[in-house]
């Protein structure tokens, strides 16, 4: 493996580790500042689950207009500071990315419950109910950052030594580096297949409830591919858009995942209209949900377009074999 490539890969590993470390430091500073906030009695005035559309982005392209539905606990509380009333909407210092511990959060903060609110004495309108992170969270993030960096460097050195060992036995050894990259991509895709298959198998044991289709149609997106050098032109693509609502233990949820796997887009709307036809607006459906996390649900307990992943694996591994002259 050439020195320039090694330096580039180590640089990428350092960048990812640096991002994790930076996020950890920022959150630690926020928690440290909140530890000095003052307590005051408060009361939960509203507790419900809300569905929000959050932006989604694919790995190697930029997409405008794409979103996915996630469920969030929305907790509102009232409190007083020096005789002045305040209304708070941020119940925790922790970040909530959606579809996470919703039943547990709703159980901790039922409507009407009396709570202790911690407010910023410099800005009493800024307050939370939970001002600490889970035990060991910061230590885990630090270990993750260091482990990612050390593991990446170790992997690069191992691959480099491995290439030097096998290069003399390859018919076209000059392409060994590119072949190693394609092999790695093939193995990563293979791992993705096993993960998705495991999710679909687990979903076969999930309970089901009746749900209702709340949105059914075609969504228009603007997307462009990207490389390490520049971006391609914007182009219009289409994808099916299916949202459904359901209730678990009295809590309403909204989801948009029909099956496991990648979201398929097309430049022709007719090619992605099949789902909208199968799931018409206001239609009744069986919703399969994760009993450990009811916000995670699916309509079809299968992996969509699995053949595309298998084809990709064959192309990656076959291309690697061709580059070094094995086929």
Image (spheres, rainbow, N blue to C red):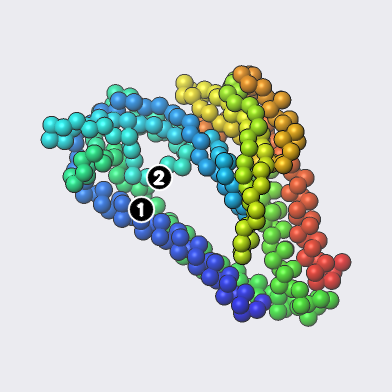
On screen, residue 139 above or below 116? below
Asked if the residue at tag 1 contacts the one at tag 2, i.e. Cβ–Cβ closer than 8 Å, the answer is yes
The structure residue drawn at horizontal position 62% and vertical position 30%, both measured from the top left corner, is 242
Residue ID for mark 2: 95
* x then y, percent, for residue 273: 72, 31
Q: Give the quarter of the figure containing the C terminus.
A: bottom right
Residue 53 in percent (x, y) is at 51, 36
The mark total stands at 2
Q: Quick check: 179 left or right of 59?
A: right
User: Which corner quadrant holds the N terminus?
Assistant: bottom right
Q: Quadrant of residue 197?
A: top right
Measuring 32% from the left and 34% from the top, which residue is drawn there? 89
Q: Residue at x 84, y 71 (%)?
A: 325
Residue lying at the far left in this picture: please name it.
Answer: 82
The residue that appears at 71% across and 25% down in the rendered structure is 277
Q: Which residue is mark 1?
A: 27
């Amino acid at each position: 493996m050439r020195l320039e490539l090694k330096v580039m890969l180590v640089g990428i590993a350092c960048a990812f580790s640096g991002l994790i470390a930076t996020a950890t430091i920022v959150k630690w500073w926020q928690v440290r500042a909140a530890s000095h906030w003052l307590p005051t009695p408060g009361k939960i005035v509203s507790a419900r689950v809300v569905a929000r559309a959050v932006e989604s982005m694919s790995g190697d392209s930029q997409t405008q207009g794409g979103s996915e539905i996630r469920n969030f606990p929305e907790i509102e509380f009232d409190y007083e500071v020096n005789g002045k009333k305040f209304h708070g909407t941020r119940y925790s210092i922790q970040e909530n990315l959606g579809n996470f511990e919703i039943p547990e959060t709703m159980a901790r903060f039922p409507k009407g419950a009396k709570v202790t609110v911690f407010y910023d004495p410099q800005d009493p309108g800024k307050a939370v109910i939970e001002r600490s992170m889970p035990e060991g969270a910061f230590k885990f993030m630090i270990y993750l950052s260091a482990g990612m960096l050390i593991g990446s460097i170790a992997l690069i050195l191992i691959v480099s030594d491995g290439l030097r060992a096998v290069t003399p036995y390859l018919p076209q050894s000059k392409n060994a580096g590119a072949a190693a990259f394609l092999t790695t991509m093939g193995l990563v895709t293979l791992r993705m297949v096993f993960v998705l298959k495991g999710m679909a198998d687990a979903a076969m044991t999930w309970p089901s409830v009746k749900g209702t289709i709340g949105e059914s149609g075609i969504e228009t997106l603007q997307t462009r591919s990207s490389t390490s050098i520049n971006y391609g032109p914007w182009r219009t693509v289409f994808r099916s858009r299916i949202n459904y609502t359901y209730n678990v233990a009295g809590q309403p949820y909204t989801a948009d995942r029909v099956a496991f796997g990648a979201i398929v887009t097309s430049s022709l709307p007719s090619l992605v209209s099949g789902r909208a036809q199968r799931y018409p607006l206001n239609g009744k459906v069986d919703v399969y949900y994760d009993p450990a996390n009811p916000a995670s649900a699916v309509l079809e307990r299968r992996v969509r377009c699995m053949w595309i992943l298998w084809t990709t694996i064959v192309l990656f591994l076959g291309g690697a074999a061709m580059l070094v002259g094995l086929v």
